[in-house]
Amino acid sequence: MLKCKECKYCNGIACRGEIPGVGGKDTGESFVRNVEAMKRVRINMDVQADPGEISTACTILGVPMSMPVFSAPVAGIKNNYGFDISEYDYSCQVLDACEKTGIRGFTGDGIDIENLFAKPAQAVNDHNGHGIVTIKPWVKEGVDARIEILSHLKFDMAAMDVDAAGLPLLRAGKTPVETKNTEALRYIKQKLGKPFIVKGIMTVHAAQAAVDAGVDAIVVSNHGGRVMDDTPGTLEVLPEIAAAVKGKVTILIDGGIRSGNDVFKCLALGADGVLIGRPFALACVKGGSEGLAAAIQKIQDQLKQAMLMTGCHTLADITRDKVRIAG
Ligand SMILES: Cc1cc2nc3c(=O)[nH]c(=O)nc-3n(C[C@H](O)[C@H](O)[C@H](O)COP(=O)(O)O)c2cc1C
C-alpha cells in the first residue's frame, strides 16, 4: 500500500506531518499554505484577442524546452512512498518521461551517497546528461565528494537544496549538512563549472545573496513544506523576490503547483519556470514513465488553454495584469 493517500486534489491536508511519507513537516501547514496561496490567485479571462498559434516553448539556462516546467527532485521513493523501486530505476523513469515530453527533470540526494546520489546522477548521465543533479548542503567534504562523482558524468546543470540545512537526520550524520553563505555558494558554482541552481529561497535577502554568489537560477521553494512549519506559501513571496532580482537570475518556483493554470499564475507573478513535485512523483509511481508523460502532457494542455482564454500567444504575453490576488 502506498504511503501517499492519492487524494483527488493534492493539498497536504490528509498527509499533514507524515514524514517519512509525503506530508509537510509537523502541522503540515507550510505545504497546505503553498496550495492555498496558489488558489488565491485568479486568472483574468479575456478572449478579445487575435486568433492564432499558441506556443509554450522556451529556453531556460540554455536548454530548449517544450514548456517552462521541471520535474522536481523527489528522493527516497521507497521510504516516502512505500514503493519498491531503486532510486536509479525511478530516476530513469522520470528522465524518460521528461525526454519524451521535452522538459527536464531533477534528481535528489541523501545520506546514502551511492544509492541516493551517485545512482540517480548515473541515470542523468545515461540520459545524455539531460537532467539536473541536486546536492544537499553538506559540509565541504560531502559536497566535494559529490562533485568528484559528477566529474566523471554528463549532466546539464546542478542544484543545491539549501533549505535541507536544518533536517535533523542529515545534521546527525558523520558528514552533516550546514547553512551556506555567499562564499560557499560561489565556491560550489566555480567547482561545478556548470549552471548552478539554488533551491529553497524564501526571502529577498536570500535571493540577493544567491545573485551575489553568481548562481544561475534560484528556486523559490520551502521544499514542499517538508523542512519547516509555518512558512508562507511560495507564491506569497514570489512577487517581492521577483521585484528584487528579476532579470539578474533565472527565477523558478515550486510548491502546490497542480495544473497548467497554476503554471500560468507563477509566470504572471514573475517566475521564469516552475517545478512540480508530488503530483509528478505519484504519476510515475503509479504509471511509470508513460503515466508521468501523460501527467506532463496534461499540464501543457492546461497551460495552452489558460493562454488561449487570456489572449496570450507566447509565454512573454503572460504578464502581471493577467492575474489578480484575492483578499
Ligand atoms: C517525498 C519527497 C522527497 C523529496 N526529496 C527532495 C530532495 O531530495 N531534494 C530536494 O531538493 N527536494 C526534495 N523534495 C522537495 C521537492 O523537490 C519540491 O520542492 C516539492 O515537493 C514541491 O512541492 P509539491 O510537491 O507541492 O509540488 C522532496 C519532496 C517530497 C514530497
Image (spheres, rainbow, N blue to C red):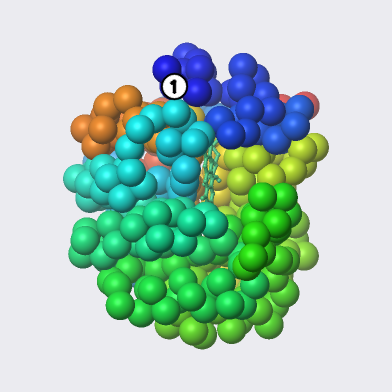
Query: In which image quadrant can residue 244 be found?
Result: bottom right
In front: 218, or 13?
Answer: 13
Quadrant showing the N terminus: top left
Q: Residue at x 56, y 30 (%)?
A: 21
Report whether the residue tagged 1 is closer than 8 Å to ligand 1: no
From the viewer's side, name the closer residue of 133 and 310: 133
User: Which residue appears farthest toward the front when viewing the image?
Assistant: 174
Q: Quadrant of residue 289?
A: top left
Residue 53 is situated, as x and y percent measured from the top left of the image, at 24, 41
- Foreground residue among 264 and 104: 104
Q: Could one spot residue 264 in this view of the protein?
A: no
Q: In the rendered image, which quarter contains the C terminus?
A: top right
Q: Position of residue 110 (x, y in %)?
A: 52, 55
Q: Which element carries disc 1, helix, strand or loop?
A: loop
The residue pinned by badge 1 equals 2
Relative side of 31 to 100, left or right: right
Give the amino acid type for the residue marked by disc 1 in the picture.
Answer: Leu
225 or 104, which lies in front? 225
Q: Is residue 182 above or below residue 260?
A: below
* Residue located 28% across and 71% down the image: 154
Horizontal relation, residue 88 to residue 174: left or right: left
**x, y percentage for residue 101?**
24, 44
Q: What crowding class fits label 1: few (fewer than 14 Cα within 10 Å), some (14-19), or many (20 or more)?
A: some
Residue 39 picture quarter: top right
Report the residue at 34% width, 68% height from top: 156
Above or below, comparing residue 246 to residue 35 in the picture:
below
Residue 193 lies, in percent from the top left, at: 43, 82
Q: Is residue 185 above or below residue 220?
A: below
Residue 86 visible in the picture: yes
